[in-house]
Image (cartoon, rainbow, N blue to C red):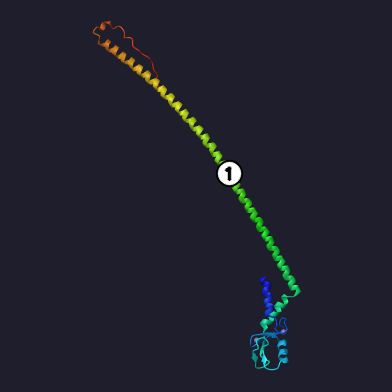
Amino acid sequence: MATSKSKTSLREDLTCAICFELFKEPVMLGCMHHFCRRCIVSYWKSVRSPVTCPQCRQEFPNKCCFQTNYLVANLVEKVRASSSPASVKYLEKELNDCLESQCSMKDAYISMIRKDKDKMEKIKKTGAELQGRVHNDFQALHHFLQVEEEAMIEELKREQEEMLQGLERHLEALQVAIRDVEKNINILRQTAGSTDQSVLVELPKLNSRPISIDI
Ligand SMILES: [Zn+2]
Ligand SMILES: [Zn+2]
């Protein structure tokens, strides 16, 4: 839209105010207004003096006060060439190609966005599943370890209890043994202290209950 508008206004700028067509051999007057060489020459021929610009009415000393403007002439040629049917057709084709390419780029971007969103959904879903699985596995592991811990503590308690009971039995046996030994010591002392050594024909009968040293 902007291009076509600027093209129109450029075309207007390059249009002769006398013949209303694109300049042919454009010339510039001292007032900077442009006309076709033929148009301004015939305009000045048709009017009597003074020599003036048909647009701004500025007066000039003679009918030679203009110069060829090659820059404008080149611009006119370019605008004329770009307005030819072949050029318009070429530009239309370029425009359509460009439009088509932009549309397919848009489609490609939309498809990439869809793929990215699908991937994000998949990552979120897989992540949640993995988190759930890890949580469950660790819960099972905690339960297993708790059961194992309890069983091991029970086993340790049982072994400790057995050892303590064994030691208690051993202690009791030792206490009985020490009482027996004390009785024996008394008997032996009494026997040794007896005045009548002749009656001692044999050692007095002593208490002896064997106990194991190990528990
Ligand atoms: Zn003209
Ligand atoms: Zn003028």
Q: Residue at x 66, y 57 (%)?
A: 110
Ligand 1 within 8 angstroms of badge 1 C-beta = no
Q: Residue at x 75, y 75 (%)?
A: 84
Near mark 1 (Cα within 10 A), the count class, few <14, some 14-19 or many ≥20, is few
Residue that mark 1 sits on: 130
- Residue 23 higher or lower than 92, as above or below: below
Outermost residue, top direction?
199
Q: Quadrant of ligand 1?
A: bottom right
Q: Quadrant of the C terminus?
A: top left
Q: Quadrant of residue 42?
A: bottom right
Look at the image and tell me whether residue 70 can be seen. Answer: yes
Outermost residue, left direction?
195
Q: Helix, strand or loop at disc 1?
A: helix
Q: Residue at x 59, y 48 (%)?
A: 124
In the image, taking residue 198 as reference, residue 38 lies left or right, namely right
- On the image, the x and y values in percent for residue 48 come to 70, 93
What amino acid type is highlighted by mark number 1?
A: Leu
Q: Quadrant of residue 111?
A: bottom right
- Residue 34 higher or lower than 137, as above or below: below
Look at the image and tell me whether residue 215 can be seen. Answer: no
Q: Residue at x 39, y 21 (%)?
A: 168
Q: Quadrant of the N terminus?
A: bottom right
168 and 135: which one is in front? 135
168 and 4: which one is in front? 4
- On the image, the x and y values in percent for residue 53 come to 67, 88
In the image, taking residue 131 as reference, residue 33 lies left or right, namely right
- On the image, the x and y values in percent for residue 100 come to 71, 63
